[in-house]
Image (tube, grey):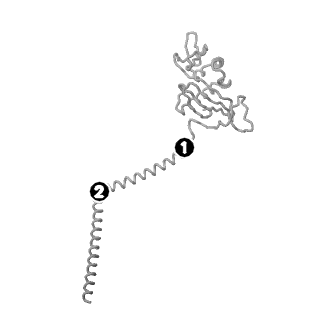
């Protein structure tokens, strides 16, 4: 009996020692972990602080960027395009050379036809007996015709310079404009309707100004264009031009942009 009690005491004692050692091991390990944490923070306090600041700055910058992007989207929706004044979907309408309105349609653009306009260079040659207007096709390197001018509204020496149509036609009288239109018409055929060929000076400047702005909107200079393919139309007493494509140095560039006269 006594022997049994001694064995039981030894067992309980061994269990107590094991539990005691386990508790000590756990406490020592916990203390070591705590010391390591304190040591890391103490060794790099500025780095941790700087990282926290950087995170805050990045998050604030991201929020500001997101807000700015949202505001830009709102501004883009509210702000009209400064160059292309108004877009009209005209692809579903067929061109009518007679100028009649489409059947069973109300308040739709009236397409007056599809035209191709070669861009020509015009050169003033000043002579002692007056001025001579030489119409020169820069694409075919061909002289189209000559128009003698006895008087110019502006006394400008442009000898040897190439100027655009609106700069030339602005200085022409009505008779000279008719002769100029006839030269272009004889060479190119009916590339423009009569009422476009005989546009008033103010409207003629708007016509070429509109084409110039449309091309500039796509990063194309008018003087680099060989041919402009466009539709001319009328809508609610407003004149519109739809530029289909242009040729620059023999390369076709699709435009498909519609705008009213500027």
Q: Residue furthest top?
A: 129
Residue 15: % across, % down: 28, 78
Q: Mark 2 and mark 1: span between their CA atoms?
A: 48 Å
244 w.r.t. 66: above or below: above
Mark 2, residue position: 44
SS at badge 2: loop
Residue 179 or residue 45, whichever sits in front: 45
Instruction: Tell me the residue at 62%/24% (across/down).
Output: 201
Disc 1 residue crowd, few under 14, some 14–19, many 20+, Cα 10 Å: few
Residue 64: % across, % down: 45, 50
210 w.r.t. 183: above or below: below
In the rendered view of the protein, which quadrant contains the C terminus?
top right
Disc 2 residue crowd, few under 14, some 14–19, many 20+, Cα 10 Å: few
Residue 76 placement, left or right of 28: right
SS at badge 1: helix
Instruction: Tell me the residue at 37%/52% (across/down).
Output: 54
* Nearer to us: label 2 or label 1: 2
Mark 1, residue position: 76
Residue 70: % across, % down: 51, 48
Residue 145 or residue 226, whichever sits in front: 226
Pick whichever of labels 2 and 1 is earlier in the sequence.
Answer: 2
Q: Quadrant of residue 196?
A: top right
Q: Quadrant of residue 243?
A: top right
Residue 171: % across, % down: 60, 20
């Amino acid at each position: 009996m006594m022997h049994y009690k001694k064995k039981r005491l030894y067992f309980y004692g061994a269990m107590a020692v094991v539990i005691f050692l386990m508790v000590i091991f756990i406490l020592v390990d916990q203390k070591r972990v705590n010391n390591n944490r304190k040591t890391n923070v103490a060794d790099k306090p500025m780095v941790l602080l700087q990282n926290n600041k950087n995170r805050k700055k990045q998050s604030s910058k991201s929020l500001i960027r997101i807000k700015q992007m949202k505001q830009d989207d709102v501004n883009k929706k509210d702000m009209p395009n400064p160059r292309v004044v108004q877009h009209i979907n005209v692809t579903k309408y067929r061109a009518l050379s007679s100028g009649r309105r489409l059947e069973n349609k109300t308040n739709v653009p009236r397409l007056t036809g599809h035209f191709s306009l070669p861009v020509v260079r015009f050169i003033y040659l000043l002579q002692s007996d007056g001025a001579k207007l030489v119409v020169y096709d820069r694409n075919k390197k061909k002289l189209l015709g000559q128009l003698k001018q006895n008087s110019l509204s502006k006394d400008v020496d442009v000898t040897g310079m190439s100027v655009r149509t609106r700069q030339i036609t602005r200085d022409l009288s009505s008779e000279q404009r008719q002769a100029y239109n006839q030269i272009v018409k004889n060479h190119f055929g009916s590339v423009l309707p009569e009422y476009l060929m005989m546009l008033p000076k103010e409207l003629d400047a708007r016509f070429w100004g509109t084409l110039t702005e449309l091309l500039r909107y796509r990063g194309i200079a008018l003087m680099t264009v060989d041919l402009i393919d466009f539709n001319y139309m009328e809508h609610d007493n407003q004149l519109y031009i739809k530029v289909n494509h242009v040729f620059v140095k023999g390369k076709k560039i699709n435009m498909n942009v519609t705008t009213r006269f500027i």
